[in-house]
Amino acid sequence: MLIEHLNRQLREREVLALKRQRRITESPCAPHQRVSRDGQPARDLLAFCSNDYLGLANHPALIQALADGARQFGAGSGASHLINGHSRAHATLEDELADWLAPSIPQALALYFCTGYMANLALLTALGDASATIFADKLNHASLIDGALLAKAPMQRYPHGQLALLARQLARCTTPVKLIVTDAVFSMDGDLADLPALLALAERFDAWLIVDDAHGFGVLGDKGRGSLAHFNLRSERLIYMGTLGKAAGLGGAFVAAHPSIIEWLVQSARPYIYTTAAPPAVAHALRESLRLIGGEEGQQRRAHLQQLIVQLRTQLTTLIAAHPKLGWRLSDSATAIQPLIIGDNAAALALAAALDAQGLWVPAIRPPTVPAGTARLRITLSAAHSAADVQQLLDGLTRAAQDLTGTVA
Ligand SMILES: *Cc1c(COP(=O)(O)O)cnc(C)c1O
């Protein structure tokens, strides 16, 4: 009965072009990857799908630091942070992350988590008790939505970026604690939240602003310090979540906030307490990642990434204008996330397949990850890409557009 029930739903997804397929990468995360699928022979693809924005995931210094960390601290942590899993490597990393956010959040302390998903569940369940209301942008990441659903506090969602509506919700709210929760860079669109305006609302309505900077940390702001630095914000009302598996190239996440908030998370957040601490070697290597991000090399990588973004957007805008019938649309994004919105699920899949046939790997993102009718290719750029790589993608998209419209250049 259960199996029939599941098989029926799986078939439905297939019919709706919603079935997802995993591929197996046979080589490290990099633009040029060896990939296999369905028992077919492995192929070399040029990938535009990782969140490894600075190209650090396969950086020799981080591989070395991971090995050094394992030599010094062993392979596994052995237990949760509140038992004996909290190593010197974790503690020192937390001190450095707190310094990283100190310009934006006075007195900030930091807490390291195994993943960003868990950090968001922890934050929203620990702070969102019955005395609170959670206000969330409709396009927030799934982990923020799930955290809010698990929390005792009711959630009110506002349409993407519509801060006038948020202001009305805040004005009507009678709970003593108000938590505004937002992605800083929206993960499927690449656009930035208006953090200065959100912070102004938090101040006006005595609320707190939780900022999920999964796609800004390491990439935006002076020295890659993230979205708060990008906007020059500074306030005790800010609660920051940064992930360390994207631009930082390793894994895990952290929350930086007022010391009492951090202490409350340690005492009460179940996704922090009831899980084994990440291997200390990862924390050790993350310290090297912070040095790279904040240093000259990070600066150069961010500058190169910026050039690639301009290259892609300029030429893609021209391509889209040349083929209006396709209905393609470029998201309003200045970040490394550059979605090409197609609309129809099957059409997005077909375009991804046309690129795949040319050795290009760009994932088609469909509902429920994005709203119905806005299926897209989520192109992400990395500092590890070259200008020639980006040109190859543009050539592939041009060929696909010509095939679809029966035109030639
Ligand atoms: C990736 C992501 C997360 C989850 O972080 P993980 O470390 O991958 O679990 C949270 N929020 C946003 C906006 C993300 O893009």
Image: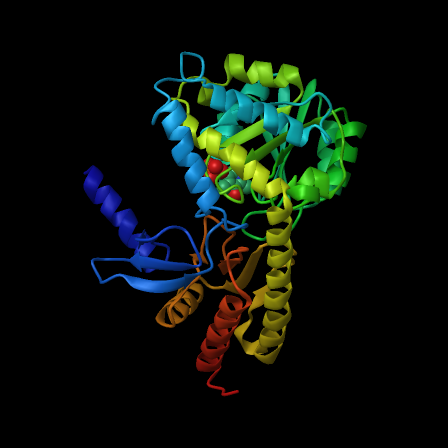
Marker count (numbered): 0
Residue at image position (73%, 31%) is: 103
**x and y, in percent, of residue 165 in the image:** 72, 40
Q: Position of residue 312 (x, y in %)?
A: 59, 66
Of residue 299 and residue 350, the one placed in the foreground of this image is: 299
Is the residue 149 above or below the residue 312 in the image? above
Image quadrant assignment for residue 208:
top right
Q: In this rendering, would 134 be left or right of 348?
A: right
In this view of the protein, can residue 145 be seen by the observer?
A: no
**Image location (x, y in percent) of residue 120:** 53, 30
Q: Position of residue 351 (x, y in %)?
A: 43, 69
- Left or right, 97 with respect to 351, comes to right
Pick the quarter of the image with the N terminus: top left
Residue that appears at 58% across and 27% down? 255
For this orientation, the residue located farthest to the bottom is 408
Image: 352 above or below 133: below
Residue plotted at (64% across, 47% down): 296
77 vs 179, nearest the viewer = 77
**Above or below, comparing residue 126 to residue 319 in the picture:** above
> Where is 302 relative to 103, above or below?
below
Residue 198, quarter of picture? top right
Quadrant of res 15 = bottom left
